[in-house]
Image (cartoon, rainbow, N blue to C red):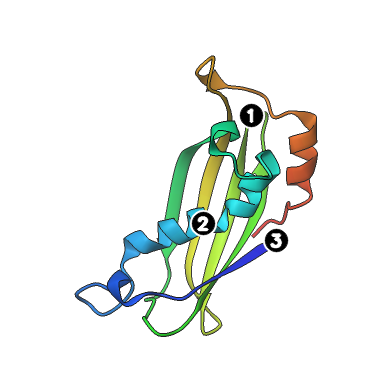
Amino acid sequence: MFTTAFSPRFYETDAFGHVNNTVVTGWFETAREPIFRIFTPDMDIKALSMILARVEVDYVAQIHYGSEVTVNTGIEKIGNSSFTVWHEAFQKGVVVARGRAVQVHFDFAGQKSSPLPEHLRLALEQHLSPV
């Protein structure tokens, strides 16, 4: 499992006084960076052989400005060419959001998904941790 901390910024709040729901998907994507580094350790974006196929977020509680948010991230399952990443966000020890992202190993030259190579599968398996 990976853990990433975020400090909500004032401009991320909305008219209701809490962090806008669109911010959470950005935090979750940022929290996937350690997984991206499995595919390209130096974060060479042109060498990142994956695409995002699906995201889902469940907003469990309001997120407020002024208190850090911690996002835990892990791998839920691994398929032939795709894998599912899970996220849980906490503020003051309370779950405020949960989410999943389906990432697909992608051959950009052929414009199609491709099977996960064994070395990547093994690296992802080290982070398998069902929610």
Q: State the mark number for residue 1.
A: 3
Neighbours of disc 2 within 10 Å: few (<14), some (14-19), many (20+): some
Q: Is residue 11 above or below residue 32?
A: below
* Residue 47 shown left or right of residue 68 in the figure: right
Per the image, label 3 sits on a secondary structure element best described as loop
Mark 2 or mark 1, which is nearer the start of the sequence?
Answer: 2
Q: Earlier in the sequence, mark 3 or mark 2?
A: 3
Q: Residue furthest top?
A: 110
Q: Amino acid at mark 2?
A: Thr
User: Which of marks 3 and 1 precedes in the sequence?
Assistant: 3
- For residue 30, which numbered disc appears in the image? 2
Which mark identifies residue 81?
1
Amino acid at dot 1: Ser
Q: Decide if residue 49 is in sight here.
A: no
Which marked residue is nearer to the observer: mark 1 or mark 2?
A: 2
Mark 1 residue element = loop
Q: Nearer the viewer, mark 3 or mark 2?
A: 2
